[in-house]
């Protein structure tokens, strides 16, 4: 099987450009921080402002995959840590 070629979206992109874009997002991130905290993640408006998160890009797929993982039991360390400790010490738990 032959590997699929992935086109480079911005072949002339420089580190300075990436840093400039990130700095340009700072005011929007700060303006939306209360809403983002309430949601538990950054806002959809911020997604629209970030070229990396545009529909169909590799980064957008990464964001989607991470969002799915955040809901997985393995990512719930604050909940599962106590339950695993209980199981380890032979105390009643709700895992098994």
Image: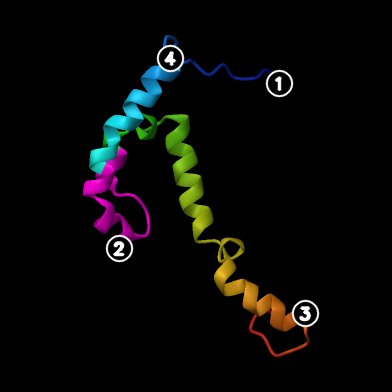
Residue in view at x 40 percent, y 31 percent = 56
| The magenta segment | 29-47
Query: Mark 2 or mark 4: which is in front?
Result: 4
The residue to which callout 2 is attached is 38
Tell me the element at label 4.
Answer: loop
Which callout, 2 or 4, points at the residue further toward the start of the chain? 4
Identify residue for label 1. 1
The residue located at (45%, 43%) in the rendering is 63
* Left or right side of 62 for 4: right
Residue with the mark numbered 3: 88
Q: What is the x, y in percent for residue 95?
A: 66, 79
- Image color mode: rainbow
- In terms of depth relative to the viewer, which is nearer, 46 or 21? 21
The quadrant the N terminus occupies is top right
Gap between marks 2 and 4, in whole Å? 35 Å
Dot 1: element: loop
């Amino acid at each position: 099987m032959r590997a699929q070629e992935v086109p480079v979206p911005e072949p002339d992109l420089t580190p300075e450009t990436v840093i400039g874009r990130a700095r340009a997002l700072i005011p929007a991130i700060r303006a939306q921080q209360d809403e983002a905290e309430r949601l538990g993640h950054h806002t959809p408006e911020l997604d629209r402002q970030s070229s990396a998160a545009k529909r169909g890009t590799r980064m957008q797929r990464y964001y989607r995959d991470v969002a799915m993982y955040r809901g997985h039991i393995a990512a719930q360390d604050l909940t599962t840590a106590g339950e695993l400790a209980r199981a380890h010490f032979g105390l009643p738990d709700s895992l098994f």
